Amino acid sequence: MREFKVIPFKPTHKSKGQTTLNEVADQLDGYFTKAASDGWEYERIETIRSHVPSKGGCFGFFKDPAYDMSNHFIVFSKEI
């Protein structure tokens, strides 16, 4: 039997300048290294899309529009 662990992944970006793909890869590597040291095996990265409804406003004025959102999750597992 396997146990699964799901961790949200949201890359941290620099406030100035552009974050490189290597920097994002290093962030992922940190998650993989930590999980492996705790006995977890990498399974996959999942992207979950969700819809955020509009909110606020009065009679349709000043309301925040609805939008779609993507979230990324790293999935690990280990034998129990």
Image: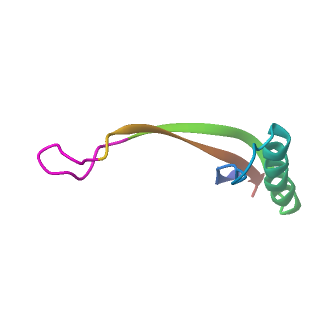
Quadrant housing residue 22:
top right
- Residue 37, compared with residue 20, is above or below; it is below
Point out residue 77 in the picture as x, y percentages from the top left corner. 73, 50
Viewer can see residue 71: yes
Q: Is residue 1 visible?
A: no
Q: Position of residue 46 (x, y in %)?
A: 63, 38
> Which quadrant of the figure has residue 24?
top right
Q: Residue at x 69, y 54 (%)?
A: 15
Residue sticking out furthest to the front: 16
Could you tell whether 38 is left or right of 5 in the image?
right
Residue 56 painted magenta: yes
Q: Relative to 20, is 12 above or below? A: below
Give the x, y percent position of residue 30: 83, 55
- Residue 70 placement (x, y as % from top left): 53, 39
Q: Of residues 42 and 60, which is closer to you in this image?
A: 60
| Side of 58 where 54 appears, left or right | right
Question: Which quadrant is the C terminus positioned in?
Answer: bottom right
Whether residue 58 is in magenta: the answer is yes
- Callout count: 0
When asked about the image quadrant of residue 60, the answer is top left
Region rendered in magenta: 52-63
Q: How is the image coloured?
A: rainbow
From the viewer's perspective, is 48 left or right of 25?
left
Pick whichever, 31 or 57, lies toward us. 57
Tell me: residue 66, above or below residue 56. above
